Amino acid sequence: MGWSVLSPLLTLFVMKLVFTQLLGKNIPHYTIYLFSGNLILSYYKEATRNGMSSFLENSGIITHINVPKYMFVLSRNVSALVNFALTLVVYFLFCATDRIEFRPAMVLLVFPVVCLLLLNIGVGLILSTLFVFFRDVRYLYDVFLTLLTYVSAVFYSIEHFSLHVQRLFLINPVYVYIKYFRVLVIDGKIPSLQYHGLCLFYALSFLLIGIAVFRHHDRKLVYYL
Amino acid sequence: MPVIEAKNVSIRYITGDFKAIGLKEYVVRKLTHRYHVKEFWADRNISFALERGDMLGIIGANGAGKSTLLKAISGIMFPTEGTLEVEGQVAALLELGSGFDAEMTVRENTFLRGALLGYTKAFIQEKYDEIIAFAELEDFQDYAFRQLSSGMKSRLAFSIACLVKPDILILDEVLSVGDGAFRKKSGDKMKEVLSGGVTGILVSHSTDQVKELCSKVLWLDHGRQVYFGGRTAEVLDLYDGFLKTKKLPDAKLFPAE
C-alpha cells in the first residue's frame, strides 16, 4: 500500500523537475496543477488495471464457489479508492504549502470522485470480462494508458490550442475529472451545471456499458477461466 | 416436492482456441476464416430428482462429467440444455482446499469462506469455535493457510461446509482425505447432518463409502447417464465389475426400481 501512495508522488517529483522550466512557467500553482493530473490519472490507472485481472486472479474461487463475480471488481475498486484517499490527504498538504485557499466549496470534490469511482467500476467490468477471453488485452490496455497519459494534459496546459481542439479534450473522461479538480482547487471556481452533467454522463455511460457487457458474458466466463 | 430436479441436463464446453490466441490472432483468424471452435459435451441428458434427506452418490470413471454436473448444481455453471431446479442454500466442496486464500490465516479464511457461501459475519462468529474444534485446528488458528498440511486444509473445508447447516451439501472427493480417525469422524458427521434433513451429494471413487452413506446412486459414463435410482447395493456391485473389466454392463442387468 505504501508504494501505491509513493509512486504518484515520485512521478510528481520527476515531472516537476523536468517540466517546470519547459512548460510550467506560465501556469500558476504548477505543482498543484501537476498533482491534480497525477492524482486522478493514477487512481484511474490503478483501479482499472487491477480491476482487469480480478476475474482471472480469483479463478480458483470463481470456478469452485457460486459467488457473484462482480464482487471481485468491486473489491479491487475499494482498495484503489483507499489508496486514492491516502494520496488525496497528501494532495491537500501540498495545497496548504502552496498557499491554496481552502474554501467550503471544495466539498464538491466529492462529486468528481464519485463519478470516477462509477467510471472505474464500469471500465473494470468491461476489461475484466474481455481479459478472460483475450489475454493480450493487458498489453493493448497498457498502450492505451500511455496514450491516455499524453492526452490528459497532466503536465501541459491546453490553452494555446484553438478552442476547437480544446473542446476535443473533453472527449476524454479522465481529463474532464482532472479539469474539475483544477478549476475548483486552483482557480477557486465552481464548474458549471453542464460540466457536472458531463461528468455524470461519462460515469453512468461507462457503468451501464460495463454492467451490460458483464451480464451478457457472466455465464460464459467460467468456461474460459 | 424434490429439492433438486434435473431434467435432460446437458452441459457443453467450448474448447475453442481463443484463450491461447488472444485478440490480435482472433481478429486475424476471423478475417482469414481460419477460426474454429470445437464443442465438447461434458454431460448429456442427465435426469434425476432428489428429495429432502436423500444422499446421492455420483460414480463414474475420470472424465465422466461428475464435477461438471456438481458445478451446475452449485450454480457455478448453467445447463446448456434442459432444466435444473435447486431449492435452498448450497454449500459445495469442489476439490479440496481450493478457493482459500493462501496468505490469510486460518481464522480469516474461515470468515472469508463463510462470506463466500453467503453467511453473515455474526453467524460465522457464532459457529467459529465449533468449526475449529471439529477440524482439530485449535493450535493453528493464526497460521497462514499455506502452512497447513493438505489434510488440515480439507478438514477445515469440510468443517465449514458441514457446520453452517446448508440445505444442500455437495462433497467432491472430500471424505477420502484426512487420516483414518478423521475419515471416521467425518463420515459420522455426514450421517448426522443428513439425518437433520440436509440433502447431500457425494462424489467418491470408494464404492464402499458410497454404499455406506448413499441412498441413491447416479452412474455417469462419458457424460451419459448409465443409471439413476435407489438400488445402491446391486448397482455398486455392477460398478465394481465395470471398474475391473472397463466394459459397461448390459442394460438388462440393472435392477428395476
Image (cartoon, coloured by chain):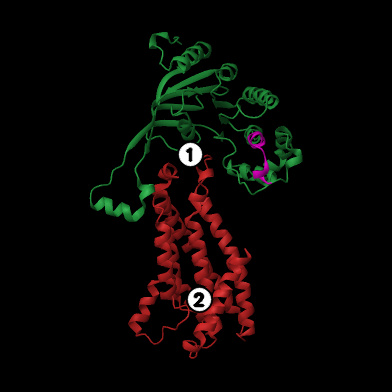
Chain colours: A red, B green
Determine whether, in the image, residue B19 is placed left or right of residue B215: left
Q: Quadrant of the C terminus of chain A?
A: top left
Q: Residue at x 27, y 51 (%)?
A: B29
Determine whether, in the image, residue A188 is placed left or right of residue B156: left
Residue B88 visible? yes
Q: Amino acid at mark 1?
A: Ile
**Furthest-right residue in this view:** B139
Q: Quadrant of residue B179?
A: top right
SS class, disc 2: helix
Query: Residue A57, percent across and down?
Result: 51, 50
* Label 1 CA crowd tier, 10 Å (few <14, some 14–19, many 20+): some
Q: Chain of mark 2?
A: A
- Magenta residues (range): B144-156
Which residue is disc 2 drawn over? A37
The verdict on a common chain for dots 1 and 2 is no
Residue A197 visible? no
Q: Quadrant of the N terminus of chain A?
A: bottom right
Look at the picture and state if B256 lies above or below B126: above
Foreground pick, A16 / A164: A16
Query: Residue B144, percent across and down?
Result: 68, 46
Look at the picture and state if B13 lies above or below A24: above
Q: Amino acid at mark 2?
A: Gly
Which label was assigned to residue B76? 1
Query: Residue A152, percent across and down?
Result: 43, 75
Look at the picture and state if A167 lies above or below B215: below
Query: Residue B152, percent across and down?
Result: 67, 36
**Furthest-left residue in this view:** B32
Determine whether, in the image, residue B29 is placed left or right of residue A157: left
